[in-house]
Image: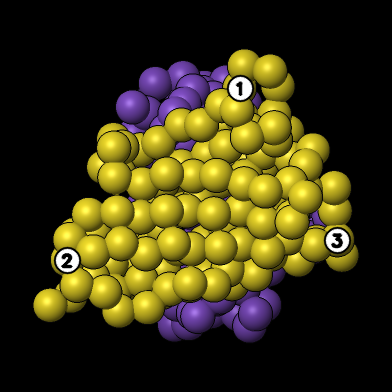
Amino acid sequence: EIVMTQSPATLSVSPGERVTLSCRASQSIDSNLAWYQQKPGQAPRLLIYGVSARDTGIPARFSGSGSGTEFTLTISSLQSEDFAVYYCQQYNKGPPITFGQGTRLEIK
Amino acid sequence: QVHLVESGGGVVQPGRSLRLSCAASGFGFGTYGMHWVRQAPGKGLEWVALIWYDGVQKQYADSVKGRFTISRDNFKNTLYLQMDSLRVEDTAVYYCARVRFCSSTNCNGYLDHWGQGTLVTASS
């Protein structure tokens, strides 16, 4: 099973700041990585797939990069609606597909 | 638009059974693979099971193998999860989710649409 590790667990940031979230895979997953956003009481929402492709309707301030085992999600200028938990997910090899433990973005 | 609605959750005693449903609309249900993913209270996401578009191939997480059964009715546009021998550790919100692409050999993709979830609580 491929283990996904996200860092940090929690990030305190101010609106308007640029933030970078990290995700590491325990082995190479090529470009088979997705990012999801989850707000309290809601289902996860797909943001990014294939490392860097934004899903339909996702604002351009969200961008993804990386390859192999190291990946990042960058939010260029945090908006109030971006404070949430973010999960990475690998789909290179499965079952199972596996998720990171999440990074919580909170308002500083 | 794509719409997934889970139902069937509730409180059940450990060892008992429960069947979840996921009603799909707004897309060609019979042409997409489907997954169940769960989230224990305050925890992260855990994959549970997947089923190919035709209902023939199925895969399960080790934690539920032999106890849970995924199935689908493409005429009713509905996905199911039969959960038997429930354990306290199965307590979670259960989400159904659509996988964007499946090949003939691989349905482990990214999940582009999710339902709102249904809460299952296994407690005595």
Q: Is residue B78 above or below residue B67?
A: below
Q: Quadrant of residue A31?
A: top right
As drawn, the label of residue A89 is none
Chain bearing mark 3 = B
> Residue at label 1?
B106
Q: Are marks 1 and 2 in contact (CB under 8 Å)?
A: no
Pick the residue in front: B103 or A30: B103
Which is in the foreground here, disc 3 or disc 1?
3
Pick the residue in front: B34 or A34: B34
Q: Which secondary structure, mark 3?
A: loop
Q: Which amino acid type corresponds to the residue marked 2 in the rendered image?
A: Pro
Colour of chain B, in one word, is yellow
Q: Do pointers 2 and 3 mark residues of a single chain?
A: yes
As drawn, the label of residue B26 is 3
> Residue at label 2?
B14
Colour of chain A, in one word, is purple
Asked if residue B90 can be seen in this view, the reply is no
Q: Is residue A25 left or right of residue B17?
A: right
Sort mark 3 into few (<14), some (14-19) or many (20+) by Cα contacts within 10 Å: few
Q: Do pointers 1 and 2 mark residues of a single chain?
A: yes
Q: Which amino acid type corresponds to the residue marked 1 in the rendered image?
A: Asn
Q: Disc 2 to disc 3, how far (Cα)?
A: 36 Å
Q: Position of residue A63 (x, y in %)?
A: 70, 49
